Amino acid sequence: MKILPARRLEGQMELPGDKSISHRAAIIAALARGRPRISNFSTSADCASTLACLAQLGVRFKREANTIIIEGVGTESTMLLQAPPSALDCGNSGTTMRLLAGVLAGQPFASTLTGDESLRARPMRRIIEPLQLMGARISSEQDRAPLQIEGRPPLEPVSYALPLPSAQVKSCILLAGLNASGRTEVIESHAQTRDHTERMLRWFGINVKVETNKQDRTRITIEGGKPPLARDFSVPGDLSSAAFLIAAAALLPRSHLILQNVGVNPTRTQFLQTMRELGADIRVRNVRDVCNESVGDIEVRGTGALANSKKQTKFILRGTRVAGLIDELPMLAVIGTQVEGGLEVRDAGELRVKESDRIRATIENLRRMNAEVEEYDDGFAVGGRTVLRGALLDAKGDHRIAMAFTIAALIAEGESMIEGAEAVSVSFPEFFALLESITER
Ligand code: S3P
């Protein structure tokens, strides 16, 4: 994909449904008693993988534009899926694999979860361990997919302290907990990760309790044995997709962008907070509660100048706040090149095991654009106030790298070419068309 520099952005739009929330809605609705309707379902290839796996497990659904009507398999006391005829292909989607593993651990049949080359290289020990503690049998080679799961219903309830901050692992255990005989507990002691599963299970009538103590330790408990009720659900616009457009509007002077109906759940808004600390003009208006999630309208005005608002030094992101920014860090690396004083990110080793090694991919591409960068095991540093140079860039098959560097190319001098740009369809197939519709050159 060829990208030319832009002068400014101007526009108002709604975004496709949140990917993280859509996965959960499809899975929970599939287990429900009745026929839930999910509107504004994500258009991403990742969520299509979740639907395809559910179809293989005997779940029937109907699609009317972006609304999906799912025939849940739940009865008063069971949530029985069917043994799949072949291995379940999760494509590029870690969320599909990790969340479905939790469901399959409590089903009375054996199944195999697999995925593309990137997904088969990602760490799965993090879900294998808790699911084995709950009684499931899981075999794999070196803790990587394909995962063979022998379900053992009902599972044994556990109390599990997450060894790393991960919403996927937390959600895997909570979904397994639905099929456990008693109360399953997950403890988050590092950082509170996105809480869509907890909120949605509650929306669907499941007894989920969340308590946070003074040390910021969060304990989530779920009562097993009862299938979700059928309730309709409306998915908010995807804030992680919005982040790329917000970044572009903040960086290009005199831009003005309004994004309506975007999910602004507080466990997802760390990016907006960070951008404001860097001096971006971002307002969230009309915040309301929709199906237990916060939704709002986001307005961004391009000021061009970004800097550490406290002092004109390097802006450092580390510690627990990094988990809340994990999907936005490649974008923030690009933004860092425009910030007075530059930017450093640490404690982000998880970036190395995402859809690509995002530290490597970010560093390599920024270097090609003439940025001053340093690579660490657990992060990176970028020098500020850099004139980026258009270059040949490589998405490394990773949707978020493709989008972050498209925005980098918009603010660069000269033309850029992104190899593997089609990866954007993993989370945001409309990205290039929507961006083009609001770009002035
Ligand atoms: C996700 C959680 C995060 C995030 C991913 C989606 C989710 O992963 O990076 O894009 O939907 O739960 P981890 O749970 O591995 O941090």
Image (cartoon, grey):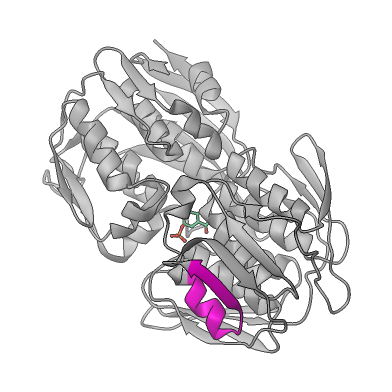
Task: Report the side of 291 relative to 220 (left or right).
Answer: right
Q: Is residue 68 magenta?
A: no
Q: In this orientation, does residue 302 appear?
A: no
**Count of all numbered marks drawn on residues in the image:** 0
In the image, residue 117 lies at what x, y percent? 47, 46
In the image, residue 219 lies at what x, y percent? 50, 81
Viewer-closest of 370 and 40: 370
In the image, is residue 45 above or below residue 389? Answer: below
Viewer-closest of 221 and 426: 426
In the image, is residue 432 above or below residue 327? Answer: above
Quadrant including the C terminus: top left
Residue visible at 66% across and 84% down in the picture: 155
Q: In this orientation, does residue 13 appear?
A: yes
Task: Report the side of 388 relative to 361 (left or right).
Answer: left
Task: Report the side of 276 relative to 284 (left or right).
Answer: left
Quadrant including the N terminus: top left
The residue range painted magenta reads 127-140
Q: Is residue 138 magenta?
A: yes
Which quarter of the figure has residue 414?
Answer: top left
Residue visible at 16% across and 26% down in the picture: 370
In the image, residue 181 lies at what x, y percent? 71, 88
Viewer-closest of 159 and 108: 108
Residue visible at 26% across and 20% down in the picture: 391
In the image, residue 23 lies at what x, y percent? 64, 53
Which quarter of the figure has residue 371?
Answer: top left
Which quarter of the figure has residue 229?
Answer: bottom right
Residue visible at 59% across and 63% down in the picture: 99
